[in-house]
Amino acid sequence: NAKAFALARKARAVPGARVRATFDADLRAPIKGLNDVRLLAERLNDGAQFMELRGDHVEAVGRLRDMLHIARAVRQDPSLACQAVAAGIDESACYRARVIGPGLRLRPADPRAAQVRAAVNELISDLLDERALADGLARALYADRIALTEQVRRSGAERWAIRPLAESQIAHEWAAFPSWIDAARARDWPAAKASIDRLLVASRNHVAEDRPLLGWLAGTGVTDRLSRYSRWFWEGVPYDRAIEKGFRTIAERRVTAVLLAMQLFRADRDRWPARLDELVPAYLKGVPGDPFRAGAPPVGYVVLPKALRNGGDRPLVYFDHGSADPVDPRAWREPMYDWHQSSSTPRRQYRDAARFRPGDLVGRKSGALAPRPDPDPSSEGVDNDPGKSDQPRQDQQEKRGPDRPQDE
């Protein structure tokens, strides 16, 4: 992929990009080329890890910056699909930065440290540049409003009896859009969610609970009562998911910037910071805010002393996508570099600054984030020791039965 990597590096010098040359008549039609964009980002992601393992840490960090630029370029297309792809690229770059961060050559005694540190500082600056995120989502919402308007208008254009209903629905959707835009540009998720909740309540009051008439006619939703004709065109676009995804991306970028700054701090002082304020102003201009808490106070930080078997501390940075309790009673046994979720329930998101193996946590009977007891070795023998036979996992499969997946 050498040629592709070289072109991606060259593209970083160009501030603007266009994913498609023209817009289709149907603004919600699939966009060609997005799969290629994702594939290029995946190659850069793997390439960054590869270069870190080879010892070329400047190039490893450079490929992460290339990924962030691709995401920034994709966001310039005013479509929700492009915003979603850009968010996925951003989160992949953040994950890889958190994985390779602890291994970067940053200590001043290393002859290559100055170049690596300069690259890391540039990466931190890129991560904290959020101008394209809210603007891209807002443009996508405006474009989708046009697409929705045209879709509804075409549905009623040649049917004079229902055309007024289409126009009524267009007016209803347009009245809601300023609130969607306000939510996308809100400072934090609680403020955005308050706007979204008001919109959802208004939509529930506007729409009957029955299945739409068109569904009844198609035989897909027979009910005892028919919906009112005035609800014919309602479809309920879930913009709230796109907006929440935007705040999630912001949180991941901010936490990643803090973790990289912590690596620089540790390289200089041979310890982790006791408080994130110690990173200011030498490594960060300020501690980034948690976008999932009202008012966006600084992201959280906790150090578990001597939590690793080698006697090392376990520092974690977190944001509150879920429970904001002072201590999360759920135990974390594995290193956390990416998104963790239990079923559909949001939970506080921790990110490790230290690198360690899943079995390297010291057992503790109490305390925040105490590791879980070791699981049944028969279920993780291969994962923990590649030299062991995989027969125990086969035994587990026999207990579950042939129709049950291994990883439930």
Image: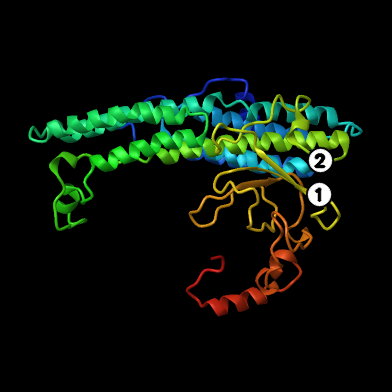
Residue with the mark numbered 1:
313
In the drawing, does residue 302 fall left or right of residue 153? right
Give the quarter of the image for residue 194.
top left
Give the quarter of the image for residue 111.
top right
Are the residues at dot 1 and dot 2 in contact (C-beta closer than 8 Å)?
A: yes
User: The N terminus lies in which quarter of the figure?
Assistant: top right
Outermost residue on the front side: it is: 326
The x and y percentages for residue 269 are 87, 35
The x and y percentages for residue 223 are 17, 57
Nearer to the camera, 17 or 253: 253
- Residue at the (74%, 35%) spot, across then down: 276
Q: Of label 1 and label 2, which has the lower sequence position?
A: 2
Residue 180 vs 245, above or below: the answer is above
Q: Secondary structure at mark 1?
A: loop
Nearer to the camera, 321 or 378: 321
In the drawing, does residue 60 fall left or right of residue 195? right
Give the quarter of the image for residue 238.
top left
